[in-house]
Amino acid sequence: MLRKLKTIKPLYYLLLGFPLAVLGSLLRWNPVFTFASACVGLVPLAGLIGEATESLAAVTGPRIGGLLNATLGNAAELIITIVAIKAGYLELVKASITGSIIGNLLLVMGFSLLLGGLKNGTQRFSRAHAATNATMLVLAVVALSVPSLFNHSLSGASLPGTITEAMSLGVAVVMIAVYLLGLFASLRSKDSALAQAAPAEAPRWPPRASVLVLVLATAAVVWLSEILVHEVDAVMKASGLSEFFLGIILIPIIGNVAEHLVAAQVAIKNKVELSLEISLGSSLQIALFVAPVLVFVSLLLGQKLNLVFNQFELLAVTTAVIVAALVSSDGETNWLEGVQLLAVYLILAVAFFFLPK
Amino acid sequence: MLRKLKTIKPLYYLLLGFPLAVLGSLLRWNPVFTFASACVGLVPLAGLIGEATESLAAVTGPRIGGLLNATLGNAAELIITIVAIKAGYLELVKASITGSIIGNLLLVMGFSLLLGGLKNGTQRFSRAHAATNATMLVLAVVALSVPSLFNHSLSGASLPGTITEAMSLGVAVVMIAVYLLGLFASLRSKDSALAQAAPAEAPRWPPRASVLVLVLATAAVVWLSEILVHEVDAVMKASGLSEFFLGIILIPIIGNVAEHLVAAQVAIKNKVELSLEISLGSSLQIALFVAPVLVFVSLLLGQKLNLVFNQFELLAVTTAVIVAALVSSDGETNWLEGVQLLAVYLILAVAFFFLPK
Amino acid sequence: MLRKLKTIKPLYYLLLGFPLAVLGSLLRWNPVFTFASACVGLVPLAGLIGEATESLAAVTGPRIGGLLNATLGNAAELIITIVAIKAGYLELVKASITGSIIGNLLLVMGFSLLLGGLKNGTQRFSRAHAATNATMLVLAVVALSVPSLFNHSLSGASLPGTITEAMSLGVAVVMIAVYLLGLFASLRSKDSALAQAAPAEAPRWPPRASVLVLVLATAAVVWLSEILVHEVDAVMKASGLSEFFLGIILIPIIGNVAEHLVAAQVAIKNKVELSLEISLGSSLQIALFVAPVLVFVSLLLGQKLNLVFNQFELLAVTTAVIVAALVSSDGETNWLEGVQLLAVYLILAVAFFFLPK
């Protein structure tokens, strides 16, 4: 979703992380170093996939382009989580879904509004599109909460696994359908911020080059994801951080660095509507599309990823959605609202940090 | 509340369900068939009570008419639930209260906005009245949640029955008082959608005929309710559905078919404010008036219906109210918002379906 | 925060409670009488502290004045709770924090809107400032909920005390930082209701007299608080009320009588924006400033006050914030919204009353 308005050159130096991670993995260097290198290398690769997708989208026209963005927009996160599912880190995957939603809504949006507000004072935007997004976000919270909350009856008993699996699949179908209908509606509407911004955007690369970049970057992301997931156990032992903390705070930050930079750049240029679109759109995509798709993908991989989140994840997502909806629904933002979003993220991060393993 | 703007003729064929149910009950036919016939027969009878009430209301003037609508507007549902209380199906009754609220907010409003939006594009309306309704709905959720959530302390212990009974009675008094004050306020206000629509409406039947229809239809509803409730056990056994599922999904659909049709008709005619009024008003009436009245009625019948709902019912009502409030609060609606409401209903229905008995 | 627009003379007769409480405490009169006298005496003293603060603020200019109001605005409540912490009544203190928030949002705002609406019909105000306050309130709920909800995992186990203590301290730092940034933003903004109202306000007393009143009233509040807290045990035994009920209903009413009167007076004069500012501002101050400060103060006093509230307190605060945010967010209020707020308070009070000790 128009993540790479301008190339952010310095990011490319981080590509150095790729060879370091590969070497570290082959030569069995310190796992924490290898893990960190893989994280660093993933940042520009995620950016490259996004940029190639948009170059392609500029050529294919808005319809197919919208679909491309919708499916490939969070490709790096999708690949990392699929590799993690294959390796059986289901808690890590669910935590990283939650973490990616709250990261986009609180960190990305928070920094953007803070910087944009400090630069431009109060920023105004049309409420109509933000209202639709807010309703979609609440719908996503409902979809993620229902199987989770139905799983824990007050008597303390949990539902049998087959029932939560069936519930998750049923809910996942509804989520994907609503996401696609929402996509269809926003592609048809003429007044969307994206539709207005898109024509100005010339393709950065010719189609062939785009496809090549896409294939290479995707392959590299797969490789780095394998390395990253392979070192998770060693990193947890060495750092004392829990699988849950890695998933909910660390992994999402890696996947969202590019969104961060673009959303903040755009907000500083006083295009607050587009900035909100990036952070809200990305969370929505993860909540309503990536999460349910992973439920089906996990079945193919012989794992059973359900949509039963723990209470901390639900609390974090619900909180983030309510605060983000409030902030984005009144048609104007200022630096203080950015501070408020960041404060909620900090409060949650403090709580997650102290949560015993 | 102005449910029958136009007669919906084809519905009257469903009156055939009445003799079939009576015969089935007397001749001990298959209970599922008898039950289904009673359901079918109740649909037009609920419509007739509504229409007779409005014919009377057109004669008596807005004040008494408003009171008539307020007390008889959900008469069919009230009768079914009273008969069910007498037979001791308290879980069914509580589930059907919840189901009726979510049915009106999600199914009725969802279909209306979907059809209205497909026909008319974006539909606009005044936010003022919708905002008051949204606050009332949240108040209703609070009223229904407080006794329920206070009942389950985190230690897992429940409160003694006498205390929840006392709490429910106290809360019920406050609910009825607020409902009546709200009714008083809306009858006094000149700018309500109902007040504007009402004068245009000529009484369909003369007063005498209205009273006769009211008495006959009410008697028939009582009869069918007795048959329906009598077959509940046999139907649960035969169909494998739980008392909870029957109460939360099936019973409310029967009682709300008329609202469905009128709200959708009105929305298609681009009168979205009136359409919202029907679905929001009907939920409010059930939550703030029917539910607390049933608490007192149950005492007269020697049963103790309290306002302690289970977590699934609370989750469903809270969810429905939040999404409906969001959708109806921004002053405009489109088909996608209809889809969003229906999606929430579907997600909840999937979860209720898989919930073990 | 501009609590004492006009002197409310009759309140000063209540100063009689001070000598009665002192005598009662020395001569060991009936504890309930002594307790009641202390309560009565605290009402005008809280008012005097507020008035002296504002007289000082009028001289020092808006910046320092704002800080004075921010720190001394709820001085009486702060003193009572500190004395109660010293005596180890931590449940009472936490309940009174919650009670003060819901009292301001539901009782004070409810009565103000009811009386203002009955006098002036629909009252309109600018939504912008109310929206910022609403977001701050939601942030406060998040801050108060996170340690509480993280403490109770679904398995029923609680976190060890050291972890909740660490979490509470971390969250408290974030809360105070956000509160101060919010204060900074509102002092800088030219269009705040307070900034407009303030210039009209002449200092009531010369600075020296203000400082003297401040010192004397504070000393008297400390004395009365000691007496009040000393009699808590005896009063609980004599009245049958729980520590929780005293804390959540009774103590906050004493501390907020002055706010009540001023907010209602202002609303009757059709200055609804200022009236909302008083009730919203006071709750915000308690939630985001008094509560976290008490966490640190308790450490100095050798007690460990954490931010883990029980489910009833959380439910009450969450409910109050949502309803107050809804009511204050649409830019207009009427008497019915006042009734709705009071109804929520009544429902909660009924539930708290029936809650077993």
Image: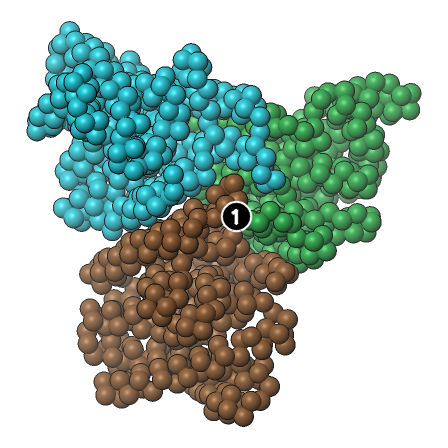
Chain colours: A brown, B cyan, C green
Q: Pick whichever, A263 or C271, lies toward us.
A: A263
Q: Amino acid at mark 1?
A: Val
Instruction: Pinpoint residue B326: horizontal percent, then vertical percent.
Output: 36, 45
User: Can residue B52 be seen by looking at this rendering?
Assistant: no
Mark 1 falls on what kind of element? helix
Chain of the residue that carries numbered disc 1 in the rendered image: C
User: Can residue B111 be seen by looking at this rendering?
Assistant: yes
Image height check: is A79 above or below B214? below
Instruction: Pinpoint residue B105: horizontal percent, then vertical percent.
Output: 31, 37
Residue at (52, 35) in percent of width and height: B149
On the rendered image, what quadrant is the N terminus of chain A found in?
bottom left
Where is mark 1, residue-wise? C138
Image height check: is C299 above or below A66? above
Q: Is residue B50 left or right of residue A24?
A: left
Image height check: is C109 above or below C156? above
Q: Total of numbered circles in the picture?
A: 1
Q: Pick whichever, C160 or A215, lies toward us.
A: C160
Residue at (86, 21) in percent of width and height: C24
Residue at (64, 56) in percent of width and height: C171
